[in-house]
Amino acid sequence: MIDTLLSTPLFGLTLTCVCWCAGIWLQKKTGWELCNPLLIAVALILCVLSVCNIPYETYNEGGQLITLLLGPATAVLALNIYRQRALLKEYFLPVLIGCLAGVLSSLGIILLLCKLFTLPDVLAVSLLPKSVTTAIAIGIAESRGGVAGIAIAGVTVAGLTGMVFSPLFAKLFHIQDPIAEGLAIGASSHALGTTKAMKIGSVQGAMSSIALCVCGIITSLITLFLV
């Protein structure tokens, strides 16, 4: 009976949904930024698979159904730009320059560190899209021969770092302009950072949302010519 259940896509799908809901509940209960639902869900799924000795391939029968939603999720990001078109039109040049600077800095640091530590190219291309949202990062990594799992890990770490420390960085570098603060958060820590930016202020949230999308587009184009 159990073997039959595990062999169906329903197992992976149900486990993912349950762990995600548990992550949301834990974040609301504790109020801690580090209790991110994505991070909690990943940790719980890994624990269940390890303790019950369930192969990843078995889980992925249902888990891959959720992965299929990444394509539509990527397309929906365009809605953010449309909704904030007035702000984008008003601050088009600062947004473009800021996002380009953020993308070049992120890509340059990754390439420099990978070369410094003589890491293989597969790790480099997997880590390059760390500062864009998961849906775009997976597409970039896989199209260049990278590993989706490593790309997701890089995106998660970058997002959590920005979400937790962005207010501290803004204070440390005396960033008081909400436009600049929002762009910096969105360019460096994508969707997770954007949720924090929305809590800081409406302008910061809007600009972070714009940066999230624009940086995703720029990164996708630039990485075509790297590695």
Image: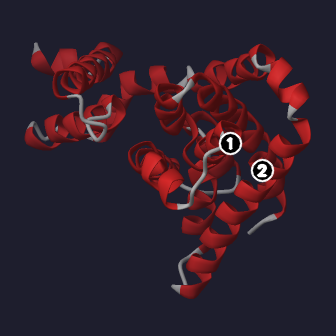
Task: Classify 10 Å Cα crowding around label 2: few (below 14), some (14-19), many (20 and above).
Answer: some
- Residue, disc 1: 183
180 sits left or right of 41 in the view: right
As drawn, 135 above or below 73: below
The way the protein has been coloured in the rendering is secondary structure
Q: Residue at x 46, y 33 (%)?
A: 196
Residue 153 visible? The answer is no
Residue 90, percent from left and from top: 89, 28
Q: Amino acid type of disc 1?
A: Leu
Alpha-carbon span between mark 1 and mark 2? 7 Å
Three-letter code, disc 2: Gly
x%, y% of residue 175?
Answer: 60, 51
The quarter of the image holding the C terminus is bottom right
Q: How many marks?
A: 2
**Quarter of the N terminus within the rendering:** top left
Question: Left or right of 63: which side holds 8?
Answer: left
Residue 9, how many percent across, how many down?
35, 17
Q: Residue at x 69, y 32 (%)?
A: 207
- Disc 2 element: helix
- 219 or 98, which is in the foreground? 98
Q: For mark 2, what is the residue?
A: 98
Q: Is residue 32 in view from this perspective? A: yes
Image point 20% across, 15% down: which residue?
Answer: 5
- In the figure, 107 relative to 45: above or below? below
Q: Are the residues tagged 1 and 2 within 8 Å (C-beta)? A: yes
- Binning the other alpha carbons within 10 Å of mark 1 as few (below 14), some (14 to 19) or many (20 upward) gives many
Precedes in sequence: disc 1 or disc 2: 2
Side of 96 where 5 appears, left or right:
left
- Circle 1 SS class: helix
